[in-house]
Amino acid sequence: MATVRSDLLYQDEIDGGKHWSFTLRRGTVLRLIDREGGANVGMLFYNPANLLERYNAPDTLKCQHTFKLTAGHCLYSDMGRVFCSIVEDTAGWHDTVCGNSTKSMVAERWGRRSYQEYRNGWTQNGHDSFLVEGAKYGLGRRDLAANVNWFSKVRTERDGTLVFDPESTRAGARVDLRFDMDTLVLFHTCPHPMNPAAEYPRKPVAYELYRGDPAAADDPCRTGRPENGRGFANNHLYHLCG
Amino acid sequence: MTKKSTLSPETAGYRKTVPAGDYWMHVVKAGQVFRIVDLEGNQAADTLFYSAADPAERYSAVDTIREQRNVYLGVGTRLMSTAGNPMLEIVADTVGRHDTLGGACSTESNTVRYALEKKCMHACRDSYLLAVAEHEEFGLTKRDITHNINFFMNVPVTPEGGLTFADGVSGPGQYVEMRACMDVIVLISNCPQLNNPCNAYDPTPIEVVVWDAAA
Ligand SMILES: [Zn+2]
């Protein structure tokens, strides 16, 4: 893909059930890799220059007439701008409507393993992970929104019933996000809230940062839909003003 | 599935008509029954709920969808909070399907969905922002404007992962009714959208009705 240049800036791996955050500059490409298959990465996005601007799942879905996220899709803020776009995706379906695991949900399904007893083998949950990472930037409960669940596939039956696909991604599946604005990224590797696994799924996720190019005039994420062309026009206006 | 209510508007303790483009912000107490009537048909009532005791706990579209394992709202749906508590339960519904995926319109999303020049057309988020500014007693700001319910909207999802905006399944006089499980602040923007064929480009009034717990 033309948007990813060869220069790898950084690589790291995060175990399952952990959380982290960083601010990515416009133009950076974040590659997420499901190392073993069956991983989940919960993710939220904010504008570091105005934390009131945040990822908006409803706008992302309705602007692109889609229920799933995959290559070609843009991830919108509530201000009509594109935080990042999915320039490559070998998984094919990512969820953004099922939310997050919580302490009580994890305890009910997989038992409660405290830090006192298990140290880093405890069973952390997505909700608390976002609260911890968000608080580093002054964000709290009121700032949490519907998150993305990378590598998790949840489809619907005709009547709207949700179906979680436990084998949605295979080992080595990856998704590349090109950041079209400076973006604060909060993420965790806790299980998807609908994961039916018998044991707490502790799946490691690798991530890599590349220096990418800004979206060209003929970029497929920009030209795939007229809506996205207008989203990029809003980004252009935003960057004109500094 | 549809289910008629046994309650009569004549016995209600509160009734109010909300014109298109206006908001309605009101506390509904635990046990009270709250009805929204689509007076002229195919209107969208964009609705948010907050716990009156702790407004940081509020309606969560994703928790509601996941806990009932279905993307559509209807009779029997429990509207869940961000803390995992049921806030209200839909007890009657003559429409059969309501949306909570599509979110509210905003001036900014109108630029993306319709045209950059549409940015100054009145939108639901403007109504929400005016409501929280005019009701400082609740302590809410833009931080608290989150993913809402679109009562009377029909937004079908396909098994392949598509999402469409279909013509409404509502009609004049249709209604949805819910019982509050906790004291809730209700914030409705009666959608002013002039760009969407779902309402035939004609936003219309709704009526809100509240019955006391004993009714
Ligand atoms: Zn609206």
Image (spheres, rainbow, N blue to C red):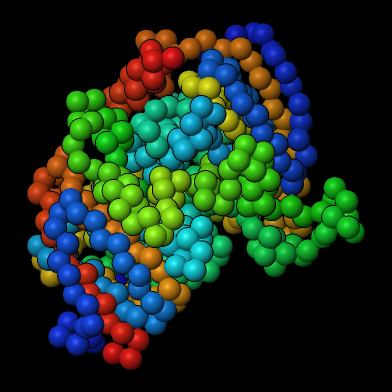
> In the figure, is residue B42 to the left or right of A57?
left
The image shows a total of numbered marks equal to: 0
Image quarter (top left, top right, bottom left or bottom right) of the N terminus of chain B: bottom left
> In the figure, is residue A200 to the left or right of B13?
right
Residue drawn at the location 34% of the way across and 41% of the way down: A62
Residue B66 % position (x, y): 50, 59
Q: Determine whether A79 is above or below B45 in the image.
A: above
Q: Nearer the viewer, residue A17 or B193?
A: B193
Q: Determine whether A172 is above or below B1 in the image.
A: above
> In the figure, is residue A76 to the left or right of A107?
left
Q: Determine whether A178 is above or below B135 in the image.
A: above
Outermost residue on the bottom side: it is: B214
| Quarter location, residue B7 | bottom left
- Whether residue A67 is visible, yes or no, is no
Q: Nearer the viewer, residue A225 or B214?
A: B214
Q: Determine whether B68 is above or below A68 in the image.
A: below
Outermost residue on the front side: it is: B137
Image quarter (top left, top right, bottom left or bottom right) of the C terminus of chain B: bottom left
| Quarter location, residue A20 | top right
Q: Nearer the viewer, residue B117 or A100?
A: B117
> In the figure, is residue B137 to the left or right of A163?
left
- Whether residue A199 is visible, yes or no, is yes
Residue A178 % position (x, y): 53, 21
Residue drawn at the location 69% of the way across and 27% of the way down: A207
Q: Nearer the viewer, residue A236 or A16?
A: A236
Residue B184 % position (x, y): 41, 69
Residue drawn at the location 23% of the way across and 31% of the way down: B119
Residue drawn at the location 44% of the way across and 67% of the way down: B52
